[in-house]
Image (tube, grey):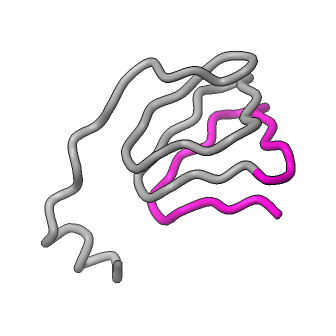
Amino acid sequence: KVEVGPVSIIGANSSLLPGASMEIGSSLGAHSLLKTSIPEYGIYAGIPAKKIGQKETFNPEILKLIGI
């Protein structure tokens, strides 16, 4: 089972292995391989995917508009 949270981004040609998960607002770069999980608002890329950055949390008003 693979889980992808709301407003997450998966780059082109990326692979998510069974058991991988992406929390709310996380991002995975193009041509990456995700074997584990990405925490909220984390930015990961590479083979295997490693943390390259962190986003700020979304404004609660924005999350409310998209129904989260």
Asked if residue 12 lies in the magenta stretch, the reply is yes
Q: Is residue 37 left or right of residue 59?
A: right
Q: Nearer the viewer, residue 49 or 29?
A: 49
Q: Is residue 62 left or right of residue 11?
A: left
Q: Name the residue rendered at 66%, 17% in the picture.
A: 46
Q: Is residue 4 above or below residue 18?
A: below
Q: Name the residue rendered at 76%, 59% in the picture.
A: 2
The x, y position of residue 37, in whole percent, is 62, 45
Q: Is residue 24 above or below residue 37?
A: below
Image quarter of residue 68: bottom left
Q: Quadrant of the N terminus?
A: bottom right
Q: Is residue 51 left or right of residue 12?
A: left
The x, y position of residue 66, in whole percent, is 33, 76
Q: Name the residue rendered at 81%, 37% in the picture.
A: 15
Q: Main secondary structure of the magenta part?
A: loop
The x, y position of residue 5, in whole percent, is 53, 62
The x, y position of residue 44, in whole percent, is 53, 28
User: Which portion, as a residue range, is magenta?
Assistant: 1-19
Q: Name the residue rendered at 69%, 40% in the picture.
A: 36
Asked if residue 25 lies in the magenta stretch, the reply is no
